[in-house]
Image (spheres, grey):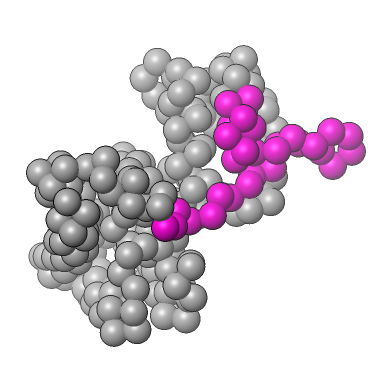
Amino acid sequence: MDTARLAVFAPVGGAARVDAVVRRLADAIALGLLADGEQLPSETELAGRLGVSTVTLREALVALRQRELVETRRGRGGGSFVRVPPDPRGGEFEARLRAFSVAELRDLGDHYAAIAGAAARLAAQRSLPEDLAPLWRSIEEMAAAPESRRGRVEGRFHIEVAAASQSARLTQEEIRLQTDIGPLLWLPRSGATRHDEVTAQHRAIAEAVRRGDAGEARDLAERHVLDAVEHLIELRLLET
């Protein structure tokens, strides 16, 4: 199991409430960290990994079924299976964007850039060559992905950078931020030229991490996020 998936199944901590479990699994499903049709571990095993009671887990699974993110199959070979929703498009994107003020977007972008920069810096310092294989796979997939899949691959790349930092907390925060603002940041950046620019930025971040250049990796990751935020703010201003 790769580091990003380990972060998904790490103990939720705190009060281990139902909504914390729902949020953790829903975020992982929305970001494609759990594949469409994938079978989740048994209730006992999954509750143990997340550090919650089986009662709490069952209530969380009920909530996920109601949101059509999980389906339960009975009988032999049954269990709980992942259902990945489509990426937000059209009016849904516009509605989500209008929910943020420009000041909120800028503040959230500053926070996200700090997390992304710290993750890239630590990845450059701590990662082993095998930790970076998922980054290069995502870069190649991003280069060839149709527009409908680019947002999800972009988000996964950033999570994989965080996972390479060997910090479970940073990885979990990256996952949280991806679900909060990732669909807004990555989806509207369409067009062949823009797509090539984003792919080149990914390659530069991964290359800095591979070289162990912590300062360069941090600066590139921060600029990449802030560039996306500025583009999003421009779109938000057009909505007013």
Q: Is residue 214 visible?
A: no
Horizontal side of 22 relative to 166 (left or right) equals right
Question: Along the line of sight, which residue is nearer the eye, 122 or 36?
Answer: 36
Q: Position of residue 155 (x, y in %)?
A: 38, 58
Q: Is residue 195 visible?
A: yes
* Quadrant in the picture for residue 65: top right
Question: Along the line of sight, which residue is nearer the eye, 207 or 125?
Answer: 207
* Quadrant in the picture for residue 189: bottom left
Q: Residue at x 45, y 18 (%)?
A: 17
Question: Along the line of sight, which residue is nearer the eye, 155 or 54?
Answer: 155
Question: Along the line of sight, which residue is nearer the eye, 35 or 109?
Answer: 109
Span of residues in magenta: 62-90
Was residue 164 drawn as part of the magenta stretch in this picture?
no
Q: Residue at x 67, y 28 (%)?
A: 43
State the count of labels: 0
Q: Position of residue 215 (x, y in %)?
A: 10, 65
Q: Position of residue 29 (x, y in %)?
A: 53, 46
In the image, residue 60 above or below residue 146:
above
Q: Residue at x 49, y 48 (%)?
A: 30
Q: Residue at x 16, y 43 (%)?
A: 101
In the image, residue 28 above or below residue 235:
above
Q: Position of residue 139 (x, y in %)?
A: 40, 75
Residue reaching furthest to the right = 76
In the image, residue 191 above or below residue 31:
below
